[in-house]
Amino acid sequence: MKAQPLAAKWRKLAEARCAAAGERLTPARSAAYAELRACDRPVSAYELIALLEERQQRKIAPLTVYRHLDFLIRVGLVHRLESTQSYLPCDHPEHSHESQYLLCSSCGHAEEVESKPIRSLLLKVADQRGFHPETAVVEIKGLCGSCAATRSN
Ligand SMILES: [Zn+2]
Ligand SMILES: [Zn+2]
């Protein structure tokens, strides 16, 4: 199977995450992960399908790619951004976490910030109201540094 090359560092981490979950990084899962890693911004499932089809020169059933994405999320290698329905490879998959994301609405760049103080503050605010949160993910939309600089020129 033709696949986007995956740097040794990410392959090792991906294999470790899969092994920890009692799973295997199959060639198809690995190909989907490598494609996401190579993108410089989060992509939708359909964009990912198009990239994989282009690389492998064949039709791929959307359901298959959704399964790979679910798998990659489950083992902590990829995050799903709810507000843009897109997928972002995690830069620190060695531990599970809930993050904050800075999403640029101009160029599509996304940056993952893993701030424990923000997370505990959110959980505290919820707790004070007797609310039982299931997640404490924050997605912040705006302009990244370079887009903001371009606009102000
Ligand atoms: Zn992450
Ligand atoms: Zn930007």
Image (cartoon, rainbow, N blue to C red):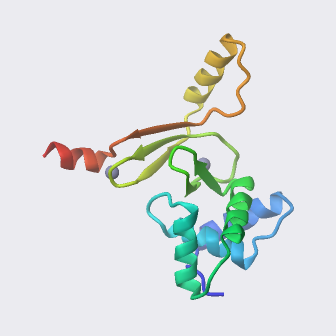
Outermost residue toward the left? 153
Which residue occupies 67% across, 34% down?
135
Please, is residue 26 above or below residue 135 in the view? Answer: below
Residue 153 to residue 37: above or below: above
**Where residue 122 sits: x, y (%)?**
60, 23
Q: Quadrant of residue 37?
A: bottom right
Q: Is residue 10 above or below residue 122?
A: below
Q: Choose between 15 and 102: the one closer to the eye.
A: 102
In the picture, residue 64 is in which quadrant?
A: bottom right
Residue drawn at (52%, 43%), measured in percent from left and top? 83
Name the residue located 47 percent from the left edge and 66 percent from the top edge: 39
Q: Nearer the viewer, residue 1 or 22?
A: 1
Q: How many marks?
A: 0
Residue 75 screen position, x and y as percent:
74, 56
In terms of image quadrants, where is residue 46? bottom right
Name of the residue lying farthest toward the right: 22
Spot occupied by residue 99 in the image (x, y as percentages of width and height): 58, 40
Q: Quadrant of the N terminus?
A: bottom right
Residue drawn at point x = 51 percent, y = 67 percent: 47
152 sits left or right of 6 in the view? left
Which sits in the foreground, 95 or 130? Answer: 130
Image location (x, y in percent) of residue 112: 51, 46
Is 53 situated left or right of 149 in this image? right
Please state if 54 lies on the left or on the right of 21 as rendered.
left
